[in-house]
């Protein structure tokens, strides 16, 4: 299928061929009929992409701060790869469309194939021929409403949420500053609510349009006309509400709002404009400044938007979906008219030219629609069922792949292509001789296309079964969100693949049991979990310098994890597990490797309501490892520091930048100022060698299972308040 995309680094716009998205449970697959260009938000994004790198940095100081923090934590090379990977990727455009339901996912019973729906969301209502849309981000289109008008649903919901924030009442007077697409809709919604409206915009054409659509008077904010209209309609008291629907860097809108608003009036910010509030003016009138967050309650809540968990109507009357349905109803009843707003309808194939004309100012428009071809060939091919590939038994149990000729490439498939995969794994594999990146599988079409373009995958798809059934693929990398690791690993093992799964292997004991059952059923134990730190060259050298030990050891591992950014999917603990469940295996595996054994018991403690953990591991020879996993430390302090003490010797690791060993002779590594090599490249080399030769996996399965069990036991220990004895790995 085709999709409109933009490269944020170069500013390039393109209509790209991408895989058809799969129809996941809890949503529907929609074939687009019309999609709406937001001439405000989207054009701002398009213009920003055309800036120099310095201009981009100046426009997004929040992102610059994140980059600097990443440099302090991960080093320059890793941060550079991550940032460039994000910038040099195609990003989607669009967030408001109308289309026909082509496929219905499990759990959906309110629409059927062939129904017309309006869709919302900058990840789900894209300028693309097909989109997967979750339940709370679509609404059925009322009978008789034209699809080109229903395509306004999302921007209509944005305007509606802004009006709701202003709490208008019959007979009040409102001022709308900015008469672009959102401003025009706000004018109509206010007029439909019995509010008299004054509009302000420097464009006389937009002022005339707003007056035709219900405004009492409109004019240039720099002229006396707007003030005169407000004085006449309010008897000199000022307007009851002001709606800021303007963009740009001028502070004029907020100053005008203070001047024309009545005492204790309401100012609602809907657009993205400068907000340097003149303190005296706002204080003296005690103005109530409010913000309108996009389409309404539910926005930015993944449980609402992605998981379909609605808010009870008795507590939250107007949600994203209810706003969308309400706006469609107003359109169908003629209370709001969007036809006069449509300046241009372009064929979808002409998308790049249309954006360029808008950006250059050649096409002056309030609203522009893309029209999609009515008839399309069936997208994609029939699904290929998963095929269980018989495993090759090796002496002593387990499965192996036979050795191959030295020049035969190892063919890899990736399931998932997020930040970690594209910054820490794929750059190493793409440069490795004897490796062929065969297929990348993602749930979103564009991420697969991006990975294919940047790393040279032969194919990109959203069909997992096609990969598992492909006998030519030697190994599968599972680099998805944590909640899917165990099930995807289980399926790949049953399909006879060698599997590299990023940590964690499992989030529950049942998930772990399912993976082990797949190993038992298939005889395939060709599994590696991404515990990369034991492969770090600096730590390998330090362990060699430390030498063998005779007595028990004491190990201390401080992990200065820091706070998560708002919106991080790591915060979805109900679905993705706790932070420690997700990444604690790294540190347990490192401790066990240094101590050359698997733990026999785990004790964990934490202050109530605090994410900081103290985890004590006990080993068969009496050695102990204490892992302090903290989120309340200073961000400038190193992320990982480790001390190992035994037999009169001390090994010290400072954040994979420097290591030292104190004993009969002191050894201190040279400082590595630019890079933190945490072992990913060496780990991948060991994995590829095992796949190529059919030899043992880099880490025994028993160790991977023991580390996973110990990680899971931390939560059990926190609940029970006592040490948890670990069963011996079967």
Image (cartoon, grey):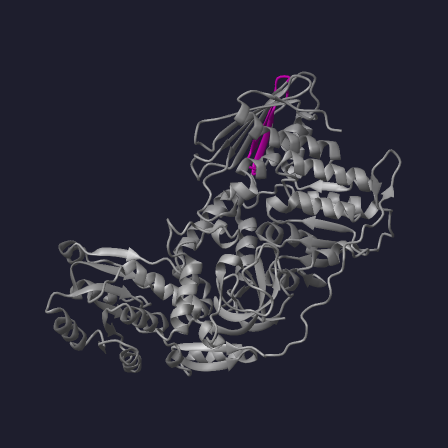
Q: Is residue 642 above or below residue 480?
A: above
Q: Residue furthest left?
A: 235
Name the residue located 46 percent from the left edge and 72 percent from the top edge.
Answer: 150
Name the residue located 27 percent from the left edge and 65 percent from the top edge.
Answer: 243
Magenta span includes 622? no
Between 22 and 404, the one nearer to me in the picture: 22
Image coords of residue 440 (percent x, y):
68, 58
Image coords of residue 602 (percent x, y):
60, 24
Image coords of residue 543 (percent x, y):
66, 29
Q: Which residues are magenta?
A: 647-664
Name the residue located 35 percent from the left edge and 66 percent from the top edge.
Answer: 159
Figure quadrant of residue 186:
bottom left
Is residue 172 rendered to the left or right of residue 491? left
Q: Quadrant of the C terminus?
A: top right
Figure quadrant of residue 164:
bottom left
Q: Is residue 562 above or below residue 568?
A: above
């Amino acid at each position: 299928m085709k999709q409109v995309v933009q490269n944020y680094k170069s500013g390039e716009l393109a209509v790209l061929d991408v895989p058809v998205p799969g129809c996941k449970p809890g949503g529907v697959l929609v074939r687009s009929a019309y999609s709406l260009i937001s001439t405000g938000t989207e054009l701002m994004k398009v213009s920003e992409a055309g800036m120099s790198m310095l201009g981009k940095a100046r426009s997004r100081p929040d992102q610059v701060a994140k980059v600097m923090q990443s440099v302090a934590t991960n080093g320059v090379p890793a941060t550079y790869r991550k940032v460039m990977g994000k910038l040099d990727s195609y990003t989607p455009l669009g967030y408001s469309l109308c289309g026909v339901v082509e496929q219905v996912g499990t759990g959906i019973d309110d629409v059927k194939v062939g129904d017309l729906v309006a869709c919302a969301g900058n990840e789900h209502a894209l300028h693309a021929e097909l989109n997967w849309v979750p339940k709370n981000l679509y609404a059925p289109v009322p009978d008789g409403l034209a699809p080109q008008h229903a395509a306004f649903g999302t921007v209509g919901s944005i305007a509606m949420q802004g009006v709701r924030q202003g709490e208008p009442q019959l007979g009040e007077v409102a001022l709308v500053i900015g008469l672009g697409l959102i401003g025009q809709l706000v004018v109509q919604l206010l007029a439909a609510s019995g509010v008299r409206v004054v509009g302000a915009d420097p464009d006389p054409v937009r002022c005339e349009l707003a007056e035709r659509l219900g405004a009492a008077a409109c004019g240039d904010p720099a002229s006396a006309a707007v003030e005169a209209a407000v004085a006449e309609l309010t008897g000199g008291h000022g307007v009851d509400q002001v709606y800021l629907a303007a963009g740009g860097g001028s502070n004029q809108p907020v100053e005008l709002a203070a001047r024309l608003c009545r005492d204790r009036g309401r100012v609602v910010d809907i657009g993205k404009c400068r907000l340097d509030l003149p303190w005296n003016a706002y204080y003296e009138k005690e103005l109530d400044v409010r913000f309108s967050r996009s389409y309404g309650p539910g926005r930015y809540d993944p449980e609402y938007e992605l998981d379909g968990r609605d808010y009870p109507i008795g507590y939250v009357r107007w949600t994203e979906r209810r706003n969308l349905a309400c706006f469609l109803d107003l359109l169908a009843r003629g209370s709001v008219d969007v036809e006069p707003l449509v300046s241009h309808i372009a064929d979808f194939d002409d998308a790049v030219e249309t954006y360029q004309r808008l950006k250059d100012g050649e096409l002056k428009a309030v609203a522009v629609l893309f029209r999609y071809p009515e008839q399309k060939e069936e997208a994609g091919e029939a699904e290929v069922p998963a095929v269980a590939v018989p495993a090759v038994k090796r002496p002593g149990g387990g499965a192996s792949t036979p050795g191959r000729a030295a020049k035969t490439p190892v063919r890899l498939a990736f399931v998932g292509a997020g930040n970690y995969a594209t910054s820490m794994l794929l750059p190493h594999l793409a440069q490795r001789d004897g490796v062929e990146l065969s297929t990348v599988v993602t749930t979103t079409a564009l991420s697969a296309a991006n990975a294919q373009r940047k790393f040279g995958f032969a194919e990109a798809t959203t069909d997992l079964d096609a990969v598992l059934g492909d006998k030519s693929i030697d190994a599968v990398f599972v680099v998805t969100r944590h909640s899917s690791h165990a099930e995807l690993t289980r399926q790949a093992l049953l399909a006879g693949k060698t599997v590299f799964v990023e940590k964690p292997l499992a989030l529950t004991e049942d998930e772990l049991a399912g993976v082990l059952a797949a190993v038992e059923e298939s005889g395939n134990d060709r599994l590696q979990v991404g515990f990369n730190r034991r492969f770090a060259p600096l730590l390998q050298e330090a362990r060699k310098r430390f030498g063998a030990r005779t007595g028990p050891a004491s190990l201390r591992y401080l992990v200065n994890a820091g706070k998560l950014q708002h919106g991080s999917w790591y915060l979805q603990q109900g679905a993705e597990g706790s932070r420690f469940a997700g990444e604690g295996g790294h540190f347990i595996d490192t401790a066990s490797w240094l101590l050359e054994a698997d733990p026999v018991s785990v004790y964990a403690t934490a202050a109530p309501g605090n994410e900081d953990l103290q985890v004590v591991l006990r080993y068969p020879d009496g050695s102990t490892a204490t892992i302090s996993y903290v989120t309340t430390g200073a961000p400038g302090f190193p992320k990982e520091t480790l001390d190992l003490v035994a037999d009169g010797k001390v090994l010290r690791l400072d954040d994979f930048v420097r290591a030292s060993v104190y004993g009969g002779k002191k050894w201190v590594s040279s400082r590595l100022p630019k890079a933190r090599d945490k072992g990913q490249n060496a780990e991948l080399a060991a994995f590829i060698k095992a796949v190529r030769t059919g030899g043992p996996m880099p880490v025994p399965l028993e160790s991977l299972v023991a580390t996973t069990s110990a990680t899971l036991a931390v939560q059990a220990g926190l609940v029970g308040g006592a040490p948890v004895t670990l069963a011996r790995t079967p």
